Structure formats: C-alpha cells, structure tokens
Amino acid sequence: GIQVEQSPPDLILQEGANSTLRCNFSDSVNNLQWFHQNPWGQLINLFYIPSGTKQNGRLSATTVATERYSLLYISSSQTTDSGVYFCAVGSNDYKLSFGAGTTVTVRA
Amino acid sequence: KAGVTQTPRYLIKTRGQQVTLSCSPISGHRSVSWYQQTPGQGLQFLFEYFSETQRNKGNFPGRFSGRQFSNSRSEMNVSTLELGDSALYLCASSLGAGVSDTQYFGPGTRLTVL
C-alpha cells in the first residue's frame, strides 16, 4: 500500500507564530485530504487537495503531486489550532492511508 | 445537512463478547468506510461499502465484519473481543461515485475491552 510520512511528529508554537507541516507519500494518488482531530477524536476536514493550492482563512495547503508531497501552512497560530493534524491519501482502492500525524501545541 | 452519526459513542465490553457499531452517512452519500484508531497502530482502514457491496477490506482478522443496508446505513461487528480491540472506531461517508471522493468522518465510537 501507499506509505505516508508526516513531519515533524511534534510542533510547539508560540501564539501568533507561523508553521509548516509536511506530508510525503510513496506513490501517485488521486485523493489527498488534511484533517484536524479534535480532543474528542473527530476528524475535521481541512482540505481536499490532490493537487494545487487552496486557502481557508489562516490555513492553506499545497500539493505537488509530481513530487509526491503536500504542505499545510498555519499562519498566526492560535491556541485553538492545537491538536493532531493528519494527512491521508487514496488511490484507486476506495480507502485512505493515513500518516502518523503531527501533534501541534500552541502556547499562549 | 446533518453530518455522519455513529452510535453508541462509548462502549465497554469484556473479552470474548461481541459488539455491533452503527454508522449513518450524510444524506445522499452511498459509500461508508470504517477505520480503527489505536495509539500503537494509528488509523487503519477496516472496510468500505457502496450500495451494499464491500469494495475493499483492510488487513484485519475475520472477527471483524461489516454490512451496509439499502438506506446506506452501515454496521460493523467484532466477535470474540480481545483486549487489543480497544480503540476508537471511526466511520466516514462519501458520495461514492468515484475513487477520489472527499471523506467526511463521524465522531467515532470509543470501545473499551476489559
């Protein structure tokens, strides 16, 4: 199956700082999603981005499919941004393969 | 539009028992997928259903099974529970027309096996 690697595993930020999370994947994909897992465990959709660039408020994402990586940018971080961020990819098999996640802690 | 719903939200069972979890997809979605999340293994794919047919199955023992009904609601069953089955079980739904649909997740069922 497709291997997904996320880095860094942990990230500690001061409120107001910017950060970049990275997702590398081992094969071509036709589905790539970024999620934020809230403290109760629910995965919240951030982006569906198999290629290109998207922005949503302080968050943006870029996927370079030909080079098999995606980046999630968090700007002007807030304490509510804390949590685990997952990258998940899919190919032609009706499933998502998840990375191990990046745990983000934003300190006031 | 209501999101994906899962019941029950929390469950405590003992080893050897069986359990059934339920998932209702977003209205109009015909694909339902199940995932298991544990601290050691992370998020792992269990199976996916579309129009009552299983299209893919993950690498789990036969004790894990699922089904989908004509209204797209899905259930998964785990028989002969083991301590290692303690996990957060997440259900996702999508339109299902293609292989690259956006997946929307429910709040999960947290299963504890004693």
Image: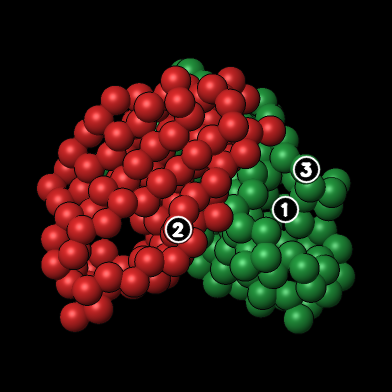
Chain colours: A red, B green
Density class for disc 3 (Cα within 10 Å; few <14, some 14-19, many ≥20) is: few
| Residues at marks 1 and 2, CA–CA distance in whole angstroms | 36 Å
Which residue corresponds to mark 2? A8
Q: Mark 1 points at which residue?
A: B77
Q: Which of A7 and B36 is in front in this view?
A: A7
Residue at the (64%, 44%) spot, across then down: B45
Quadrant of residue A95 within the rendered picture? top right
Please name which of the two marks, 1 or 3, marks the residue nearer to the observer.
Answer: 3
Tell me which chain the residue with mark 3 is part of: B
Q: Which residue is drawn at 31% across and 46% down?
A: A72
- Quick one: label 1 or label 3, which is nearer the N terminus? 3
Does residue A36 appear in this view?
yes
1 and 3 marks in contact (CB < 8 Å): no
Amino acid at dot 3: Asn
Which one is nearer the viewer's eye here, A56 or B77? A56
- Is residue A101 found left or right of A82 in the rendered image? right
Secondary structure beneath label 3: loop
Residue drawn at x 51%, y 67% as measured from the top left: B9
Residue B32 image point, x, y percent: 54, 37
SS type, badge 2: loop
